[in-house]
Amino acid sequence: VQLVESGGGLVQAGGSLRLSCAASGIIFRINNMGWYRQAPGKQRELVALITVDGSTNYTDSVKGRFTISRDNAKNTVYLQMNSLKPEDTAVYYCNSRRAIGGVSSYWGQGTQVTVSS
């Protein structure tokens, strides 16, 4: 199983980034997919979740700025991040969690997002 994140980088406050997570080795369409982040000295937190039926959920601090989406044909989940703030700086991780017929969960290696003020 592999979850490979891409799209991180350095951006100025107010800018945008689009993260991608390409999955292999799982039946993508039966997995809920999530984006988490971990800033230095802080616990990993859930940023956004998209379920197998396309329902989405966001942590309050990113509502209205971030959008999670999935393309089951490409086995890929995306996180569009707009109006970025310095407090969004963190390593962003992709997570899969099987929703049907099991409880397996996997993590990507993470991608760094740095927002300068």
Image (cartoon, helix red, strand yellow):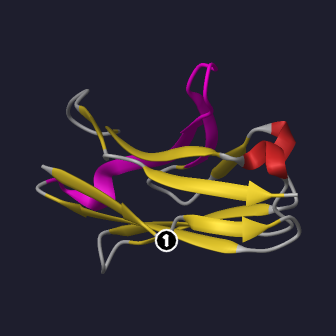
Q: Nearer the viewer, residue 16 or 25?
A: 16
Q: Residue at x 88, y 69 (%)?
A: 14
Q: Is residue 55 above or below residue 106?
A: below
Which x, y percent locates residue 51?
A: 50, 50
Q: Which residues are magenta?
A: 26-49
Residue 37 visible to an observer of this rendering? yes
68 vs 103: above or below: below
The residue that label 1 is drawn on is 7
Residue 103, position as x, y percentages in the image: 26, 26
Q: Is residue 104 left or right of residue 115?
A: left
Considering depth in this image, is 66 or 111 the residue closer to the camera?
111
**Horizontal and vertical percent position of residue 79:** 59, 64
**Front position in the image: 108 or 23:** 108
- 23 sits left or right of 57 in the view: left
Secondary structure beneath label 1: loop
Q: Tell me, yes or no, if residue 80 can be seen here.
A: no
